Amino acid sequence: MAKRILLIITGGIAAYKGLALIRLLKKEGHNVNVVLTEGALKFVTPLSVQALAGTEPHTALFSPTEESRIGHIALSRDADMIVVYPATANILAKMHHGFADDLASTILLATDKPILVAPAMNHRMWNHPATQQNVDALTARGVRFVGPEEGDMACGEYGPGRAVEPEELVQTIRETRADKISDIASGLRVLVTAGPTHEAIDPVRYIANRSSGKQGYAIAAAFAQCGAHVTLVSGPTSLPAPEDVARIHVTTAEEMFYACQHVGPVEIAVCVAAVADWRLETPSAHKLKKGEEERLQLALVRNPDILASISQPGPTRPPLVIGFAAETDDVQENAAQKRTRKNCDWIVANGVDAQNAPFGQDDNTVMIIDETSTETWPHLPKEEVAARLVQRAVQAVRARTSHSV
Ligand code: CTP
């Protein structure tokens, strides 16, 4: 699938490989926009870039003509991904520390798009603790590295530091999803429960609720689009499985409970499902027939609480557990109590009333309640609620665990 790629070429002898990459990407039908750093201009000319890419490269941060034509924010916004090839030790240091003193570093600081970096430098520079710390920190933030390779270097030495060949980078770009929002959640494992549960009364009837599963599915999709490994345990819904999400179908609360227990360790669990609190003690094996009676009593027993069980303290407890609460009265107070009672870290609360009846709808008004604060978000599409929640959750879990996969 054709992608819009913003290629940043930085200054090094391997900059010529950037030109070869442009040619290969264009051959595959991608749209390539190029930024040259001051260093890169010493190795490749804007004219050769223009001839290959079909558009003029961008070079200056404070250029009145360029900023009015296309600003640094727009350059990132209009791209599906950013590729830095070759990447010098200098640009890695700038990226790690958030420098924004030229067009390339400013774009890299301002972007929320996936970033692919292919470093090229002398092996001593690559192995230096400063560079290695930069690489570790950037990897933890979701920046993806390709290479460097080991081999003969332009300086006559041998070791790791050679930029990968452009063909290898093209392959990686091909494998990166075009709708991928970022890599911020890469390396994180996430469990999401969604949808209603159905508790059988007899072979044709069941107890259910109004949950459509839309919010849970949007959250699972948003985590996957940010690079997480997502398992979605879903009650009955008609929604298609989001791309790159492992979906496990269940019907009852008990099935959902056991499915969640078997998912294995995760860093984040988000229980969005509207789980039936009760099930029939003994569902009838045959369809219940009406007699003369005016009243029918069904004996119900409690279902296991999935959220409370995931939140139990212990070595397998995920570092971040998020529950949901749909309340009709005293939303904030009831939801806050639910958070404490179920021992989860955050509760996403929504009021169910005439103004906000989220069931089956495409948007939602929610409050995020954690140990110390309550945040009220505006009325938003469920996808936007999901995207914001993912950002907040990933930040929190990385801070809690210094997780750097
Ligand atoms: N939940 C769960 N397992 C259950 C019941 C609820 O995992 N058996 C989770 C839901 O997925 C949600 C949170 O608990 O994240 C709150 O669900 P809710 O139905 O509002 O909570 P209840 O405990 O059922 O409280 P209430 O008394 O309001 O029904």
Image (spheres, rainbow, N blue to C red):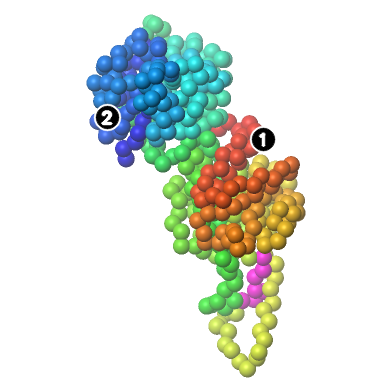
Q: Magenta part of the protein: which range?
A: 277-283
Asked where in the image residue 202 lies, by quadrant, the reply is: bottom right
Q: Amino acid at mark 1?
A: Arg
| Mark number displayed over residue 359 | none
- Using the image as rendered, state which of residue 15 and residue 65 is in the foreground: 65
User: Label 2 belongs to which residue?
Assistant: 26
Q: Which residue is at a point 65% across and 53% down the rendered structure image?
A: 349
| Image quarter (top left, top right, bottom left or bottom right) of the C terminus | top right
Residue 327 in picture, x, y percent from top left: 67, 60
Q: Nearer the viewer, residue 205 or 372?
A: 372
Within 8 Å of ligand 1, the CB of disc 2? no
Q: Is residue 342 visible?
A: no
Res 51 visible: yes
- The image shows residue 305, relative to residue 145, as above or below, that is below
- Residues under labels 2 and 1: Cα distance? 42 Å
SS for callout 2 = helix
The residue located at (64%, 76%) in the rendering is 282
Task: Give the labeled residue for mark 1.
Answer: 400
